[in-house]
Image (tube, helix red, strand yellow):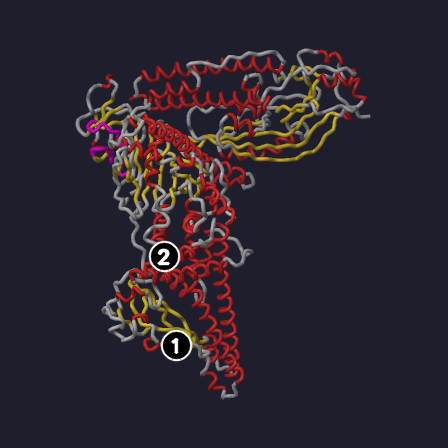
Amino acid sequence: MAMEIPYDKNVVRNAVGRLARLGDLYDARTDSFVGFSIFNEPLPENAVELIKTPAMDINFMNSENMLEKFEKLNIVPELRASIMANLVSLEGHGKYLESEAKNKKARKSMIYSIQTEVEKMIFTEDLNRHFALDALDLDFATHFVVGITWGANTVISLEENDYSGKEIRKNVNDDLNEELRKFVSRIYKPKETILAEYKSSYTIEMYGDILPTTNLPKTEEEAIEMLKKLPRLVQMANRGKGKPIMYALMPISVLDDYLNGTSTKEVILPLDKNVISNFTNFMSEIMESKLEISDLMYKLESHRYCVPDENLRKLAPLKLQVEKEEMKSRLEFKGLIIALRSGNDVTQAPLESDFMPDKIKSQLKQFDNLLICYDCKEALCFGFDGFFYCSCGRAPFAKFSFKCTDVRHGPQFVHFDARRLHRLLKEIPPLNELNVLILGVTGVGKSTWINAFLNYLAFPSLDAASKDELLSVTSTSFQLTDEDDKTHTIRFGQDENEVLEPGQSATQDVKAHLFPIGDTLLRLIDTPGIGDVRGVEQDKENFKKILKYLSSLKWLNGICILLKPNESRLNVLFEFCIKELLTHLHRSATNNVVFCFTHSRETFYKPGDTRQPLGELLRKNQIDLYLNKNTMYSMDNESFRFLCAANQGIEFRDSVKKSFCESWNISVEETNRLISHFKKLEAHIIDDTISLNDARQNIVCLTKPIADISKNIQQNLAIIKDKREMLSSTEANEKDLVKMLFVDIIKLETEPLNHPRTVCGAASCVEYHPAADGSVGAVEYVKHCHSHCGLTGVPVNIVGDARIQKCWAMNGTLNCTQCGCSWDQHLHITYVQIPVATKITVQDVETKISGKKSERQQIEEFISKLDEIREEQEDEQRKIIEMSVKLGRYLSKNAILAYNDVLGKYIDHLIEKEEQKVVVDGNDDVLRRLKSMRAMYEEEVKALITAMAQPNAEEMTFAEFKTHLVDLYALKHNGAQLQNAIESASSSGGEKKKNNYEKFHRPKNDGRGYGLHSAGRFESCVEMSQVVVTKTTNDGLVRKYTRWITSKIWK
C-alpha cells in the first residue's frame, strides 16, 4: 500500500556528470552528495517505478557567456550559485561550464540532449524496513534522491583557427553556426558525403556524459561519427538508461515527519533569486575582463618583435591579480551562500578592489592610442582605396613613414614594409553600423534636429557645450528678437544641400551623415520633407531618391518620424504625410519606427496634442504601431538654437539660460534613450522595403500591357472560332478549303522611344485597325506633329494636357502648324504599339498534305490544331491575370499600408487652393496638372485594389515573385510582347541619375568622436589606434599591434 507523502517540498538538481542512486543522501547547503544512502540494503524492484520518456533535443548557443550556458543547459538557479562558488565538482557535459575562452576567437556550441526514462521511488509500507532510521538524525545531509531522469547530454564546440588578433567578425560566427547546423543534417548522411564536405577551418571540442575518456574527436568526420553513435552509446550504458542528467531530492525532514509523526523545522533556506542573478552578472563581467587581458596578451605576443617588453610585463601581473580577485570573490560567495542556506545572519560588505571589472577596463585603456598626422595633428584615417586621409589631404599608404612615441624606439621616422602594412590594413574589420532614417513633414525642423541631436550626444550639459565648438553637419537658420526688440537672423553651419530661403523646402536631397562613436558608426540619413512646397510630384521624386539611396545599405536600425507636438486635429496634410511615410515601409519595419517630437519644451517634454490624432490614425488604419515610452521621444531644438544665438553675441537673461539648461539636460536623456533603444532592436532588412516598392511599381506598370494583351487574346480567340465554324460548316470544294489552312493572328509589337513624341489624336489624324469581329482593335497615331519633342513635364498618353501648348508644333497658337487640329487634340507618347497581322500555318498539316492524305482529313487535323491554339491562349490569359493577383497578395501581406488613400483628398485640397489662385491671376496650368494627377491617382488605386481583391490568393516571397515574372515572359504566344511592353514602359522617359551621397565627419583628437571634415570618396575610413605619429618624409618605426576602428563611407 502506497504511503501518502507530500512531494511539494522536493527540489531538483542537475547531475552535471555526478553519479548517484535512489536513496543517496545529499547536502543542499553545499549541493553535494555525502557518500551514504538512506537505505540500509538494496531497494526491492517493486519499490521503483520506471517511466519511459524518450526524447531528443538540440540547442544552439549564441553568445557563449556564463548566463547563456546556464540557461541552455537548464541549470537550476540554486545549482548555478553553487557552481560559481566552486562547491560542485563538474564532470561529463558539466565540464563545458568550466571552459573559458583564452582569446577572442569566434566560438559556437551546440547541445545535443537525449532522454530515455525517469526512475521514481514508490513509497509503500513495505519500504519502511529498508530505511536506515539513524540517517534521519544526520547533520551532514538534508535531502535524499527520490527520482532520477536518465539520458545523456553532449556539447560540441567549434572554434575558428584563423585568428589574427582582430575583433570577432560576424561572418565568422555565422559560418560556425552554419557548420553546426550542417552537423545535425550530416548525422543522417553517408560517410562519403561527410568526407567530401570536410573543412578544417576550426577546432572541435566535445564534452559529454557517455563519451570515451581518450581519443576524443578532433576532426569533423570523427565528430559526426561520434554524434551518430550517441544513441547506441546510451543504450549500452546502465541497461539502456544512459547516465543521470537530473535528480529529484526530497527533504529528510519530510520523511521524518511521516515516519515518526513529528514536525521538523526546515533545515535549508533557498537563496534569493536576485542574489544569484547579481553574482552571475558580476562573474560574467570578471570573465569578460579576463578575456580582454588574455586577448591583449595574445596580440602582443603575436607581434612581440615590435612591441616593448614593458607592455607584456605590465599585463602579466594584471592578469594574475585579476585571477586572485576572482578566486577571492568565489570564496566569499561560497561562505555567503552556505550561511544563507543554513539560516545564519549574514552581513556582507560590498565588494571593492582595484581589480573590479570596471577598474580593469580603465587600466586597459592605457594601451589605446591614436595614429596622428605630424603636420595637421589630426587622427589619420585609411581608405580602402589605398590612401591615408587627414586634413592635409590624402597620400598612398606606402608613402608614409612612422615614429613611435616611446623614446626607446628612437627619434627617427621609419618606413613600414609596404606589403606587410597592406596585409594589416586589409584585415581591418568594420565598425558596428547604426543606420537611422529620419523622415518628417516639411518644416518640422529635421536639419536643426540632426544638428541638435549630435550636440546632445557630444555634450552632457549646456555649460559643457558653451565651452567648446558646436558641431554642425547641416545648415540651420532662424530669426530671433532680442531684449531690445531687434530682429537678428541666426545662421549656423554650411551645407549645399540646404536652401534657407523663406517659403522653400530646406532639404533638397538625401544626405547621410556618418559619425564614428566609440565602436559604432552612426549613420543619420537626412531626407527631404513630405508635403514639399513644390507639390505632390516632388514628393514622389523625393521618395524615389530615398529608396534609391537605401538600396545601397543592408539594414536600418531605426526609422525616426519627426512630428511637432501640437497637432491637435487629424487634418488632411497631417494624415497624408503620416500615411505617405508608412506606405513606403515594409511591415517588418514596424518595430523599428519611433516618433520623435521636436519643440517639445512648450508641451512639457511630452507628445502634447499630437498624440491623440496620431493614435487615432494608427488605430483607424489597423497599423501595428503602438504609442508608448519605447516609440515616443520628446526633444527640444530650442536649447540648441539658444546656444547658436548666444555664440553669435545675442545676450539672454540668466533665468532664460536656466530654462534652456533644463531643456538641454532632458534632450540629452531622450537622445541617449533613443540610441539605446535602436541598439537593442533587430535591424530591418532594407531589401524587404525595396522589394515592396518594386512590387507596387510593377502592379501599376503591368496594368495597361495586361489589359491590351488580354483584349488581344480575346480577339484572337474570336478569329479562331470563326475559322473553325467556317471550316466545319462550309460545303465548298475540299480543294478550296485546303487553301484556308491558316489563321491571321493580331499581335501588338512595341517600339520604345528614348524621347517624347507629339502626335495628334483627332479622328482625321489616326488610323483604326479593325479586329476580326469588326470592332476597333488598335489605334495608330499616324500624324507625328513633332517627332522629337524636347518639352519635359508633360504626362504620357494624356490628351489635351495644358503644357503641350508649349510644343514647337503649336508655335504659340491654339492650332497645330503641322496638322491644323486644335492643341487639345494632341498628346505625348514614348512608345507606340504597332498592330501586326501574322499568318499562322499548321506545319503538321502541310507535311500530311505532301503525304497525299485526303483533303477532308487535312481540314480535320487543322481544326484540331486550332483547338490546341485556343486552349493555349486561354491558359496564357489565366496566367496573366493570376500573376497580377499574386503581386497584389504580396503587396497586401507585406505593406504597412498598400497605398495612401488620403492622397486623393490631399490633391483635392491642393486643387481647391489652386482654383482660388486662378480666379486672381487666370493661370490654370498648375490646376490642369493637378486634375491630371488626380485622374492618374484614381487609375493607380483601381489597379492596386483589383490586384488585391482576392485575400485568399496564394502567398509568395519577393524571390518567388521574380520567378513568376520570368515565367510570364516565357509564355509561348504572348510572353515576348508582354516583356517588351513592360520593359518599354519602365525604361521610357528614363529616370535621371541620382546624386545622393554620404558625408563622413572625421573624429577630432579631443576624443569626442566627431569632426566636420569630409574624408572624400572612399569605401571605408579607419582610425587606427597605435602609439605612433606619422609623416610623409624621412624614416620611422610603427608598432604592429593595433586596435582598429572602422567606418563605411560612400560617395
Give the vertical position of 509 relative to 29 (above or below).
below
The image shows residue 771 at horizontal and vertical percentages of 43, 77
Main secondary structure along the magenta-highlighted residues? loop
SS state under label 1: strand
Q: Which mark is in front, 1 or 2? A: 2
Q: Residue 384: within the magenta?
A: yes
Give the quadrant of residue 356: top left
Q: Nearer the viewer, residue 979 or 946?
A: 946
Q: Which residue is mark 2?
A: 913
Q: Which residues are magenta?
A: 374-392
Q: Residue at x 38, y 38 (%)?
A: 599
Give the quadrant of residue 761: bottom left
Q: State the CA–CA distance, disc 1 to disc 2.
A: 44 Å
Tag 2: amino acid: Lys
The image shows residue 868 at horizontal and vertical percentages of 51, 72
Residue furthest to the front? 484
